[in-house]
Amino acid sequence: MKPEEFVGLVQSLARPVVSFRLATIDSAYVSGQPRVQFDGDVLPGERTWPRLSGYTPAAGDRVLIAMVSHGGVILGKIV
């Protein structure tokens, strides 16, 4: 590894990596943490997603998810 590559790697580890994804709450959702279908996916994933307390999920809601490290959180409904 070149020195500049190493420095870039260390710098990237020092900053949290946050990205955002669009998804739709699973049409079978009733309660609890919902499963979502990310844009471009054919089916909802198996994983359930936590949400901010100000948002109450409903089946079919279009949502914004903040992806952080190995997880993420539903920020709310897109209206």
Image: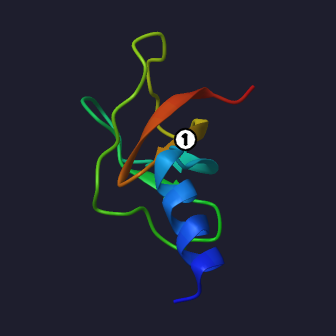
Classify residue 75 as left or right of residue 40: left
Farthest residue to the left: give it: 32
Percent position (x, y) of residue 49? 35, 42
Farthest residue to the bottom: give it: 1
Residue hosting label 1:
65
Picture residue at 75% right of the left edge, 25% below the top: 79
Query: Of the residues shown, which amino acid type is indicated by label 1?
Result: Ile
Q: Is residue 18 above or below residue 75?
A: below
Percent position (x, y) of residue 48? 29, 47
Q: Is residue 59 above or below residue 67?
A: above
Classify residue 78 as left or right of residue 67: right
Residue in front for this viewpoint, 73 or 37: 73
Percent position (x, y) of residue 59? 47, 37
Residue in front for this viewpoint, 7 or 42: 7
Q: Is residue 72 above or below residue 50?
A: below
Q: Is residue 54 above or below residue 29?
A: above
Q: Residues within 10 Å of mark 1 (few under 14, many from 20)?
A: many
Picture residue at 59% right of the left edge, 87% below the top: 2
Q: How is the image coloured?
A: rainbow
Farthest residue to the right: give it: 79
Which secondary structure lies at badge 1?
A: strand
Q: How many marks?
A: 1
Picture residue at 27% right of the left edge, 29% below the top: 31
Picture residue at 40% right of the left edge, 27% below the top: 51
Residue in front for this viewpoint, 65 or 10: 10
Percent position (x, y) of residue 63? 60, 37
Classify residue 55 as left or right of residue 5: left
Farthest residue to the front: give it: 3
